[in-house]
Amino acid sequence: MVTLCLFTVHGAAFAALKTTGSVRRRARALARRWAVPEAVLLALFMMATQIHRPCLPAFVVPSLGVAALLVVAGTGEPTREGRAFALSALAVATVVTGCFLALFPDVLPSSTGPDRSLTVAGAAAGPYTLRILTWVAAFGAPVVIAYQAWRYWVFRRRIGCARKAPTPAPIPAPAEDVPDRPGPLHRSGEEDAPRA
């Protein structure tokens, strides 16, 4: 529930930052409305974490996230949507960091016994794998960063639905008077007379 509400606030802040019109107003209101309940949920989550796994840094770091969410609740002006998005991103980062600090040195605690938990040392890859991954990251990370920068540049403007006046149906042009052309059985100059 904590992460659901947190990412609802973060997504609404992003939607308010990148849209216009009624979507922007509704997203900004949603982010402000959910920020305070999320701050309360995050504070309760921090206290429950401290009871289960006491760690002072795991309490202090998410406290910054709670403060950031309370500031998001107060950012109602359209000029502060970037600040609201940055603060909600900070709240996400502090929650992840706080969980990591509370679990350290475990990565995945065991429910059967602490000696069976997966630790950081046990989850680490071997030296050869780390060497290969370092080379992959050295060449892959700049490509990913360049792509993300390009994508952000392409989609840098706000989007929205522009209401256009309905276009009237086209009025058909008047038919031109075209002289009758004689058909294959019609001779010009002769009148159609009934045959006997």
Image (cartoon, helix red, strand yellow):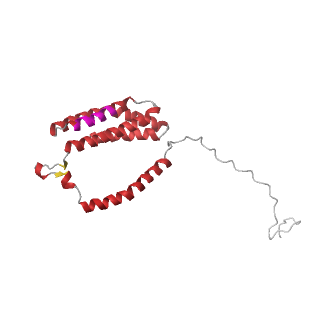
Residue 191, x across and y down, in percent: 87, 64
Q: Residue at x 47, y 32 (%)?
A: 79
Residue 82, x across and y down, in percent: 43, 37
- For the C terminus, the quadrant is bottom right
Closest to the observer, 22 or 94: 94
13 left or right of 92 in image: right
Numbered marks: total: 0
Magenta stretch encompasses residue 66: yes
Q: Is residue 41 visible?
A: no
- For the N terminus, the quadrant is top left
Name, please, the residue furthest toward the top: 74
Q: Main secondary structure of the magenta part?
A: helix
Q: Residue at x 38, y 29 (%)?
A: 74
In magenta, the rendered stretch is: 57-68
Q: In this view, does 51 lie above or below 183?
A: above
Residue 181, x across and y down, in percent: 81, 64
Q: Residue at x 16, y 36 (%)?
A: 51
Q: Residue 129's quadrant in the figure?
A: bottom left
Q: Can residue 180 be seen in this view?
A: yes
Magenta stretch encompasses residue 31: no
Closest to the observer, 151 or 111: 151
66 left or right of 81 in image: left
Q: Is residue 131 above or below residue 14?
A: below
44 left or right of 21 in image: left
Closest to the observer, 172 or 58: 58
57 left or right of 169 in image: left
Q: Residue at x 51, y 42 (%)?
A: 161
Name, please, the residue furthest toward the right: 189
Residue 167, x across and y down, in percent: 62, 44
